[in-house]
Image (spheres, grey):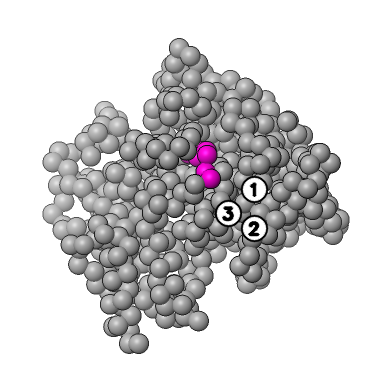
Amino acid sequence: MRFSSFADLFSHFAKRTPEAPALRFERDGSLQTMTYAEAEAAIAGRAEELRGNKTCMGVLADGSIDCVIEIFAALRAGMQVVLLDENAPLTLLRGLLPYTDVDMLWGDSELCEALAPSLARGVSGGEGRVLFFTSGTTSRSKAVVLTEKSMCACAYNGSTLLPLHEGDTLLCMLPIAHVFGFMCGMVWGLSCGACVALGRGARHYIDDCAFFKPTAVSVVPMLLGFLVKQGLLNDELKVLLVGAGECQEALINAVKAKGIRVCFGYGLTETSSGVALSIGDEPYAMTICPDYTLSIAPDGEILIKTCACMMQGYYKCAEDTNVALADGVFRTGDLGSIDEKGRLHVTGRKKDMLVLDDGTKIFLPEAEGALSHMLGSADFALALSAGRVTLAIYGDGRSDDELLDAIGAYQNERPIGQRVASIKRLSEPLPRTATGKIKRWELKARL
Amino acid sequence: MTREERLERTIKIVRDCVPELENVELREDTVVNTDMGMDSMNFILVICKLEAEFNARIPNRQWTKLSTLGEVVDAIEKYSK
């Protein structure tokens, strides 16, 4: 069903199926359930408390039941909500609060205290807006402005292709500060009247499936690989939705052998998440959701048009918005094709970026710029090899250890998954265009 | 338990969790995920096993700051219950 807001969604199911489980979570070691009627009451009650002088809620999202209620309550109270990664560096968070006009914070009390001096004065006209930061690693973070309406429309689109039902339990394992985790880990299930189990974070990747016994889970390839390798997928599981990249065929086959349906999704933060889903036997042939119109530019770039699900823009970045979204058409930076059956095939990236297995993007000009200060005149580039961030380098006399020492500062400033994990020596100089730009695809083929 | 003993047990757990490291030398100054070839999922698995072994709970925000095996051992000691 298509909802116009989350208030609309919860009040609908609170009337239609009040006793159906809406949210499942752990508290004090035991499994707890909140019905749709209870969730509606909790959200409405908290919204009443929040109505007042504050206008923009920053949520240091930990994915807990209190966090989820706070998000929906703040929206119902007419606040703008900014979803923040609670594990982001403090210096980054300090910069994001004034940029996004956050005048009230929810989250870990120590962290909130440390961030209190950075609070802003709030915003007017932010009702129904949810701000997500794209999952990139650039220091120039941009917030994407979505609305309750665009997110509900996107969830409706996804559920028309891949519906869940009242008896289903969708496990939300991924961080909800990112749009894929929020939409495909939570809103997808709620919009179908299913139950959403709130995962307990990375620490419980090893036992969340056994604890919550989900029938559906949204994952990124790296997490899927981990769950399969460690034998953690539960018997009740029927559907796996994989986003943010491709998986090894052996992995897909291992999941299918357990009788679990594997679907791949393509989407972006700017389009409120899912644009296309693979619902047939071919994992990377994706059916386009009804509210989206896709076309392929002459250079192969995927262009998206959608009135219902498109972002309002980048927050306070009109220039960037105009570049990415001209005449209502969003330039994705991804390359693809559309087959004779109208299905989308994503073939690569136009932008200079790496997309890691967990969906994180590394913007190469920035990362390589930082490394060039440490590596001097070396002929090098960053690339992905076997899913790992790899330093490809030509003609440098230093040993691997010496190179790693040289980039020590770069490594220490980044989370583990984004650090250089391997070094590959090239026998020829880096492939470049006539203007000196690195031919990324040729480099990838060499590796 | 001495720090050296903790380091030894930590290395054993790392090897149990990531069999691919069977022939890799692991030392206190080994950089996690760079020298070791451990991806972030294996790193999570290792930390969870270490926390269970040493009855510790390292705050999530500290996880991403751990660089070397020695730092992991120090964090285990600091956050033991």
Q: Is residue A350 visible?
A: no
Instruction: Please tell me which of labels 1 and 2 falls first in the chain.
Output: 2
Q: Chain of mark 1?
A: A
Q: Does A334 sit left or right of A191 as displayed?
A: left
Q: Nearer the viewer, mark 2 or mark 3?
A: 3
Instruction: Please tell me which of labels 2 and 3 falls first in the chain.
Output: 2
Label 2: element kind: strand
Q: Give the residue number, with chain letter if any, for mark 2.
A: A25
Q: Which quadrant is the C terminus of chain A positioned in?
A: top left
Label 1: element kind: strand
Label 3: element kind: helix
Query: Looking at the image, is A212 positioned above or below residue A384?
Result: below
Closer to us: A263 or A29: A29
The number of discs equals: 3
Neighbour tally class for label 1: few under 14, some 14-19, many 20 plus, Cα within 10 Å = many
Neighbour tally class for label 2: few under 14, some 14-19, many 20 plus, Cα within 10 Å = many
Image position, residue B28 (x, y; %): 27, 74
Q: Which region is colored magenta?
A: A236-242
Neighbour tally class for label 3: few under 14, some 14-19, many 20 plus, Cα within 10 Å = many
Q: Is residue A214 visible?
A: yes
Q: Give the residue number, with chain letter if any, for mark 3.
A: A212
Q: CA distance from mark 2 to mark 3?
A: 8 Å
Q: Residue at x 39, y 27 (%)?
A: A347
